[in-house]
Image (cartoon, rainbow, N blue to C red):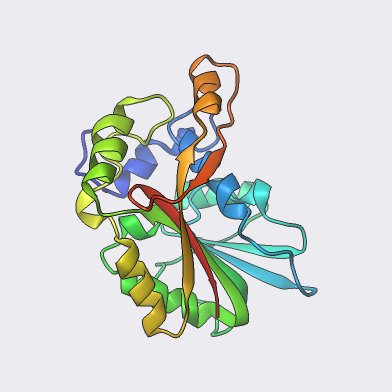
Amino acid sequence: MPRRPRNDPGQYDDLSSEWWKPGGAFAALHWLAAARARLIPPAGRIGAQLVDLGCGGGVLAPHVPSGYEHHGIDLNTSALAQAAERGVLAVRADVTAVPLPDGFADVVVAGELLEHVPDVEGVVCEIVRLLRPGGTAVFDTIADTRWARLSLVTVAERLPGGPPPRIHDPALFVSPARVREAFSTRGMTVHLTGLRPDPLDYLRFLRDRSRTVRMRPTTSLSGVYQGWGVK
């Protein structure tokens, strides 16, 4: 496998067989997807629409509440093909220029996306544009802190279940203040909470006794954090 620059999109082609491999390179994305789904409200109408920005291989699909049409937006064709196999309506597009109309979505999700893009404000603008009045934004990302760089790059990239080496560029990590401001400027208030893996679950994962690690809420926003808000 070639050694690529940090945050190089080509890594997702190199790791295309890992999306659904139990305990594979994207294991943590499955754990985070389950935590993310807890913030998705029940479908409030017939034909409710959920737009999943940066959907990857469709790891959110098993957790989406019934009643939603699940649209996945990504640029990686191999990931989109796997998402489509799991019922996602896959669309190849840039997350700052989604080919869907204003006010289309009841829910817009951006899971582990903001720390991969240079234009965070552009993504937030697209989230707000896509949402119907009363629609919900759900997201998670990584804080721009020394602790995040140490724990989620220097250490976690060497641990089972951690992110693949070089998948993140710490220069793109996003402060909670920046996220709040990006949404506030566009008329939305977001609520944030930190996330951490359950230590006993992770120990069972290391012992190959479980593939699932629950992500627990924490008051600290210095590492992985998630948020939601209503338009």
Q: Nearer the viewer, residue 229 or 159?
A: 229
Which quadrant: the C terminus? bottom right
Q: Residue at x 53, y 22 (%)?
A: 205
Please tell me which residue is depicted at 47% across the width and 71% down the height of the picture: 190
Reply above or below: 190 against 14. Answer: below
- The tally of labels here is 0
Q: Residue furthest front?
A: 219
Residue 112 shows in this picture: no
Percent position of residue 117, x then y: 30, 61
Q: Is residue 76 above or below residue 19?
A: below
| Quadrant of the rendering where the N terminus is positioned | top left
Q: Does 51 appear above or below 23? A: below
Q: Residue furthest right?
A: 46
- From this viewpoint, is residue 163 visible? yes
Q: Is residue 150 left or right of residue 51?
A: left
Question: Along the horizontal axis of the image, is 154 left or right of 206?
Answer: left
**Which of the 4 quarters of the picture holds residue 149?**
top left
| Residue 125 image point, x, y percent | 40, 78
Is 214 in front, or is 70? Answer: 214
What x and y, as percent, mark residue 153? Answer: 27, 38
Q: Residue at x 68, y 53 (%)?
A: 87
Q: Position of residue 5 (x, y in %)?
A: 19, 43
Q: Residue at x 33, y 32 (%)?
A: 156
